[in-house]
Image: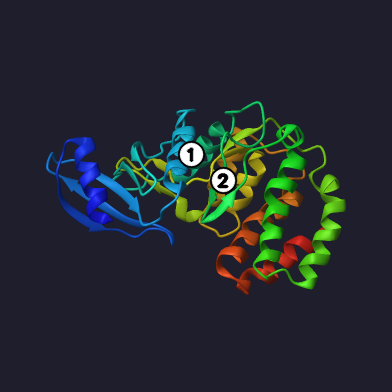
């Protein structure tokens, strides 16, 4: 398969691969930097056969639309691989996290008419449902409950991970979701969708770069909630974001409901070591 992928890349780019270096990546794809005869370098993701790479490419192209924060340029996208520009890292700027916060805030000003996205994609290796009906397209509460929390909870049932405590918490949560989210809804905003500390970097000039997205249009509080779930963001980042585009009052209270989506996904991807955290987040509101 690797030889076929390399041959296709050489054919499409009219350039020959003369070197390959394995680099650290996520838990799903294999990642390599390719050196070309022309002197160019590209970042190659492969090792997963599905629409995942095409949909990641679509997400990166969507994040590039506001032109406020750098994302890797898509070179080629196929069912078997994704080829991106290779971004070299330089020295991180002293104000890097302030810039990251400010740029993310401005990306979040880019909006759409409806919640969701024109296609379903992936959050890790799990399907992420973005396509909507009339109800979920126009209601953030309904979209988040149906397409995020309930979808993940049903997966925990299917995978045999839904404990009695989690089930009881979800029964209560369904009755409380309107109260929790309340009147916090905003226009559907462009979201990275999986914004943790491993999905940003700095480029050759020290500027922020986002990658590995799970893009959709939703509530920006959900993007921010993910940043505080697994760490990797500084106080300066949050201060800069709030200065540029302040969140509505009560965002701290709602943070846990948005983190629950990602913790449930971790239960479904990695097993019950995340179950107690999911039970806590699901049960904290009632």
Image quadrant where residue 207 sits: top left
Colour mapping? rainbow
Query: Visible in this render: residue 199?
Result: yes
Of the residues tagged 1 and 2, which is closer to the observer? 1
The picture places residue 145, in percent across and down from the top left corner, at: 75, 48
Query: Visible in this render: residue 95?
Result: no
Q: Within 10 Å of the Cα at label 1, are there few (<14), some (14-19), or many (20+) other Cα atoms?
A: many
Left or right, 142 with respect to 42, comes to right
Which residue is under mark 1? 59
Local secondary structure at mark 2: loop
Looking at the image, residue 207 lies above or below residue 4? above
For this rendering, which residue is in front, 75 or 92? 75
CB under 8 Å between discs 1 and 2: yes
Left or right, 35 with respect to 98, comes to left
Mark carried by residue 186: none
The picture places residue 250, in percent across and down from the top left corner, at: 77, 45
Mark carried by residue 193: 2
Q: Within 10 Å of the Cα at label 2, are there few (<14), some (14-19), or many (20+) other Cα atoms?
A: many
Q: Earlier in the sequence, mark 1 or mark 2?
A: 1
Residue, x 26% and y 44% (percent of image)?
A: 42
For this rendering, which residue is in front, 21 or 17? 17
The picture places residue 216, in percent across and down from the top left corner, at: 58, 39
Residue, x 20% and y 46% (percent of image)?
A: 7
Report the quarter where the C terminus lies: bottom right
Looking at the image, residue 4 lies above or below residue 85? below
The picture places residue 162, in percent across and down from the top left corner, at: 72, 68
Left or right, 264 with respect to 201, comes to right
Residue, x 35% and y 36% (percent of image)?
A: 73
């Amino acid at each position: 398969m690797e030889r076929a992928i390399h041959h296709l890349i050489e054919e499409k780019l009219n350039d020959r691969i003369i070197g390959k270096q394995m680099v650290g990546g996520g838990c799903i794809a294999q990642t390599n930097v390719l050196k070309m005869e022309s002197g160019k370098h590209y970042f190659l993701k492969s090792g997963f056969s599905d629409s995942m790479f095409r949909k990641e490419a679509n997400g990166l192209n969507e994040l590039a639309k506001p032109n406020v924060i750098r994302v890797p340029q898509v070179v080629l996208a196929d069912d078997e691989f994704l080829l991106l520009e290779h971004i070299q890292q330089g020295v991180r700027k002293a104000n890097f996290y302030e810039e990251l916060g400010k740029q993310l805030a401005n990306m979040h000003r880019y909006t759409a008419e409806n919640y969701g996205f024109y296609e379903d994609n992936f959050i890790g290796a799990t399907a992420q449902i973005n396509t909507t009906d009339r109800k979920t397209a126009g209601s953030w509460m309904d979209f988040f409950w149906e397409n995020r929390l309930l979808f993940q909870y049903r997966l925990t049932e299917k995978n045999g991970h839904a404990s009695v405590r989690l089930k009881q918490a979800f029964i209560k949560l369904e009755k409380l979701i309107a109260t929790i989210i309340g009147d916090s809804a905003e226009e559907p905003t462009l979201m990275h969708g999986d914004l943790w500390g491993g999905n940003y970097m700095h480029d050759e000039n020290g500027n922020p770069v986002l990658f590995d997205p799970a893009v959709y249009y939703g509530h920006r509080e959900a993007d921010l909630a993910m940043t505080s779930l697994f760490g990797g963001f500084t106080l300066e980042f949050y201060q800069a974001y709030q200065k540029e585009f302040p969140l509505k009052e009560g965002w701290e209270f709602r943070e846990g409901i948005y983190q629950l989506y990602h913790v449930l996904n971790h239960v479904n991807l990695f097993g019950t070591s995340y179950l107690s955290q999911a039970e806590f987040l699901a049960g904290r509101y009632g």
